Image (cartoon, rainbow, N blue to C red):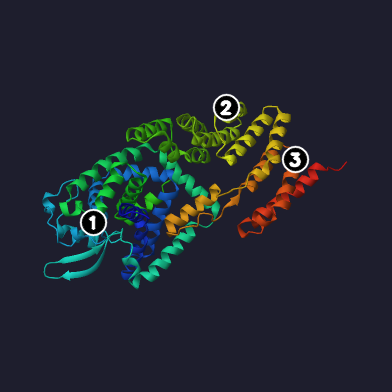
Amino acid sequence: MMDDKGRVRDEIRRKITFGINRIGILYYSQVLIDPEKYDLNYQYDHFHFQEKRTFEPGFFRHIFMLSHKSPNFQSNRSFIMKIILRDLSAGRFNTDQLSGNVDLVSFHNKNKNGDYGPRHSRRMLNDELKELVYENRRVDPEDRKISYNSAFSIDPTKTYQIFDKAKEMFDEEKRQILKDQKSEMNHLRAISLKEIYHEIWSDLVVLQEKMLNILESFDDEIKSSEYFSVLHNEVYTFSSYFIILSNHINSICEIFWFMKKGKDKRTSILHSYPVLKVDMNDIDKTLSIMDSVGWNSKDIALRLINVPDALMSFGFDSLALKLSEKLMTLCRNTELGATTSLEFISLLRNQGKYEEMLKISTFTIENYSLANDRLLFGLLKIRNAEALAFNGKRNEAVNELEEIFNIRCQFIENYIPYSTRVTQTFDFVLKEKRSLNDAGSIPERVSILLNLICSTLRIDEYCLAKKYLEELLYTESNYFKREDAFDLFLHLNKVYNDMIFRCNPKK
């Protein structure tokens, strides 16, 4: 049974993860309330900016650097950060700080930590931050005490009729963004690439210090909350949830920074296409910062394991190889190191570096204990067979492939493929939908046969590919009855017909 501390931790982590989704709902509520101000052009700019910022890494980097240089951005971020941290620390999502119930320093004496006076706070929220904070109800007109809910509020948005249509509109927007699995993979690559922007990691270090200072400035009542200690620990340990929270805050503030600009300036920014630049300096500085905040080799590798593929997809082939090699070195003699090696081997193959591919695959198989992960062992052996073939050792390659084929029945577990995990991640983060653990899982045996087929096609062993195709199509028919496997079934049948022709050419 989960203890109280575990319950509080999970609750606050869920609030951190899903709080940002309220931004779209709150924005749409303003569209419905004040449609003349929030016209079509405004709506277009709002979501076009969010989409470009999320899925175009060059645009993201340009906006990050541009906005963070702005004194207004920094001032607003301090203000917003204090609102959100107070809400999270108190375990409430009604900002008492902004209702006039808490004494704050006068606006004229505000400092860079965002200590605004209640009057200025109300004006700022009413006039400028409607996408972030909305008025819930007026408590005392004489004292101008106003009750607000922040963007991190989860429940209130589901209790007002006006948000029914807003939620529907927001869901439609998400459906348009996530049209197919290929788009999701491309989006993930764009998101993954940002992991090695060193300025983001430098900013996270700054944010950690600022958040800790803000948390320490809260009164004893807030500090005594069970939520406070959990939140403080997330920030202090530089956890993944601290990073999510920081990214949310930056997203809010960059959107706000952009939408406060005039129409012409917004149009100019939206029609800019900054050149994406990434170099070895990004990798070195990022790894250095990760090490400086106390992350171990496993943490670093897990955070960056998808980045080489992202680098490759955006044309940074040499950087992808260098990063993969660094990650593999970080995780030597661990199972994660073998997984990293598998990715590295695929990158080497894609670049035609077959001698290096064979060297790494042979070393990994000989030096890693893979008894606990038979699927990883099988995939490494298949990649090693490809490397042998590409280096002129075709007989040895065929023997390796046949060895794996002959023990295919030993692969009896199920697993969730990477592409399905990507889809589930988007479902979880954007739709707040928890997928079942085995949702979308496939038998390891099917995966092994698919990899055998792909490998034999790459090395032009067509009759061997035909043999493996027959085994897959005829013995795994139950798998192909699944709706999500139908397209693959049709594709494999076309490949099979081609293999029949290639293995029986006309004389």
- SS at mark 1? helix
| Residue mark closest to the camera, 2 vs 3 | 2
Q: Earlier in the sequence, mark 2 or mark 3?
A: 2
Rendering coords of residue 477 (x, y %): 70, 55
The reply to whether callout 2 and callout 1 are in contact (CB within 8 Å) is no
Q: Earlier in the sequence, mark 2 or mark 1?
A: 1
Rendering coords of residue 204 (x, y %): 31, 41
Q: Amino acid at mark 1?
A: Ala
- Residue drawn 74% across and 30% down? 395
Question: How far is disc 2 from disc 3 in space, using C-alphas?
Answer: 26 Å
Rendering coords of residue 60 (x, y %): 39, 45
According to the image, label 1 marks what residue? 90
- Residue drawn 42% across and 67% down? 168
Q: Which mark is residue 464?
A: 3
Q: Is residue 153 left or right of residue 454?
A: left
According to the image, label 2 marks what residue? 363
Few, some or many C-alpha atoms within 10 Å of disc 3 (few <14, some 14-19, many ≥20)? many
Residue 275 seen in render = no
Question: How far is disc 1 from disc 3 in space, using C-alphas?
Answer: 64 Å
The reply to whether callout 2 and callout 3 are in contact (CB within 8 Å) is no
Q: Earlier in the sequence, mark 1 or mark 3?
A: 1
